[in-house]
Image: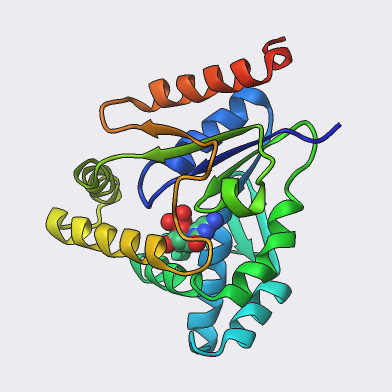
Amino acid sequence: MTVPVIAIDGPSASGKGTVACRVAEALGFHYLESGALYRLVALVSLREGIALTEAARVAEIARRLDASFRDGQVFLAGQNVSEHLRSEECGKRASEVAAVPELREALLARQRAFRQPPGLVADGRDMASVVFPDAGLKVFLTASVAARAQRRYKQLIAKGISANLRTLSRDLEDRDARDAGRSVAPLAIAPGARLLDSTPLTVDEVVGQILDWYRESAPRAKD
Ligand code: DC
């Protein structure tokens, strides 16, 4: 029997990570945050001064990436780099390296290796279209730019980091345009994906909706 996959794609700050993690917990499934892999490659490329134009070297980073994931934290060669990965600098660079086709190809096998029993919830931009096209449930999770900027603003302020709503909105729009406009695996609603606009919803409501859809699509998962 194939291992079930729930693919959750969507733009930056749509709440994919929080939602995907909660859905995985509720079902006892594994969780893949594919954006973390792109951010890890971005971090290494920044540290080693590898230019975006050096596609073969960028892809090479993915092949030798010594990454591990434990308790919601990300480790690079044993060092906890979770905070570094969430920086705006790393996020911006991640969306740039993500446009390198050789890199996307090099990350495919690594992402598919997360598909282990009893199941996987994977979030990203191309989970439904490219990485797990046979996923049993495909969700495109989105929210208005204003709602996403507001959520990110609150997160930053809660961490004691100063932030500006207008700048955050502009950055999100820039990133959306870059992720949707690239020629390989652009951010888009995959055929068969269900659209979920979380603008008016709480996290609990979004998680509940995805679990309902999953149970409808896999009746035996109810037990
Ligand atoms: O989900 P995130 O914001 O952590 O992702 C960081 C960047 O990586 C994002 O700008 C686009 C890219 N990405 C991608 O191209 N494909 C994925 N499956 C996940 C992330």
Q: Could you tell me residue 160's position as x and y percent?
A: 25, 52
**Looking at the picture, does residue 149 appear above or below residue 51?**
above
Locate residue 25: give its quadrant: top right
Instruction: Residue at the far right: name it.
Output: 1
**Looking at the picture, does residue 158 appear above or below residue 201?**
below
- Quadrant of the frame with the N terminus: top right
Say how the picture is coloured.
Answer: rainbow
Residue 69 visible in this rendered orientation of the protein? yes
Residue in the picture at 78% in, 41% down: 116
Left or right of 7 in this view: 84? left
Left or right of 193 in this view: 215? right
Question: Number of labelled discs?
Answer: 0
Left or right of 180 in this view: 107? right
Locate residue 76: give its quadrant: bottom right
Residue in the picture at 68% in, 70% down: 106
Residue 77 visible in this rendered orientation of the protein? no
**Looking at the picture, does residue 169 appear above or below residue 134?**
below
Q: Could you tell me residue 176's position as x and y percent?
A: 33, 58
Locate residue 143: give its quadrant: top left
Instruction: Residue at the far front: name it.
Output: 191
Q: Could you tell me residue 175's position as x and y percent?
A: 33, 63
Q: Could you tell me residue 219's position as x and y percent?
A: 68, 13
Left or right of 162 in this view: 207? right
Closest to the observer: 141 or 158? 141
